[in-house]
Image: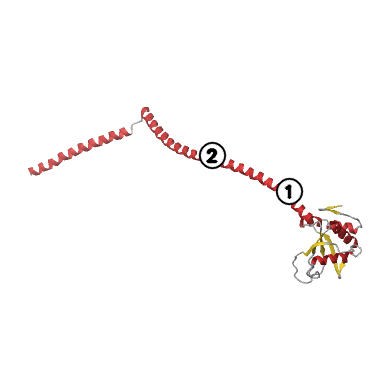
Amino acid sequence: MGTPSKKQSQPTDNTSYESDTGDRMGASQNEEHAANHAPLTLADMEKLFLSMEERIISNLSVQLSADRATIDRHDQTIQGMEVALNDMETRLQTVESTCTTLSRGNESLKFKVHDLENRSRRNNIRITGVPEKVEGPQPTAFIELFLAETCGAEAFPSPPAVDRAHRVATARKTQSDTPCPFIARIHNFQTKERILKLAREAGPLSFRGCNIHIFPDYSVEVSKKRATYATVKSELRNAGLGYRMFFPAKLH
């Protein structure tokens, strides 16, 4: 019975040792917990604020440096664009000035070309209504005889001199379409004017049963301008009033 009592006393000592160790560890943890949760002093707060300020300034400095580099790149790009735009504006002004000069020169050249074209037609007459193929292989000789026959032998004892004559090529779908008009160049300007005067005074002309009309030969531009007075001229004729058309398109 004595032996078992000794065996029971040994565990009692170990249990007491472990209890003391646990008490010391618990006390240490309580001290650390109390230290961690101790109220901050003003110095601690200042250190904390300084540390936060340094970290914020450092981060801001890095970000500002990156932003500054980006802004510098954008500034260089904008400066390059400004230089390019100024250059383009200068070139555009030069082009506009050149275009204005060329446009004025083109208008002057167009006027001269139209004037030269109409001057080259001054001795021409346009004849409409002449049946097709009656001229044969010699249209110039035919027009000389045609003018003498149409205007009368008393007007031209000898056929008027014609430098050349030809039909204007136009599309004719059927034989019943209007015959292609003649363009004839009269050798003398005074003879051409006499032919036009006789044609106006004679009224309706006919040749081999066909109605004939003789007009001055103008360029397309002048013809369009003179055509705008067609209604006015018709009203003047119906009213028995005389009028005259001056070159290029002036009604008097």
Q: Mark 2 points at which residue?
A: 79
Residue 35 seen in render: yes
Question: Furthest-top residue in view?
Answer: 43
Residue type marked 2:
Gln
> Looking at the image, is 29 positioned above or below residue 96?
above
Q: Using the rendered view, name the quadrant where residue 79 is placed.
A: top right
- x%, y% of residue 184? 80, 62
Q: Mark 1 points at which residue?
A: 108
**As rendered, which of 129 and 124 lies closer to the eye?**
124
Residue drawn at point x = 68 percent, y = 47 percent = 102
Question: What is the secondary structure assignment of the residue under circle 1?
Answer: helix
Label annotation for residue 139? none
- Mark found first going from the N terminus, 2 or 1: 2
Residue drawn at point x = 24 percent, y = 37 percent = 25
> Looking at the image, is 115 positioned above or below residue 88?
below
Q: Indicate the quadrant containing the N terminus: top left, top right, bottom left or bottom right.
A: top left
Residue 204 seen in render: no
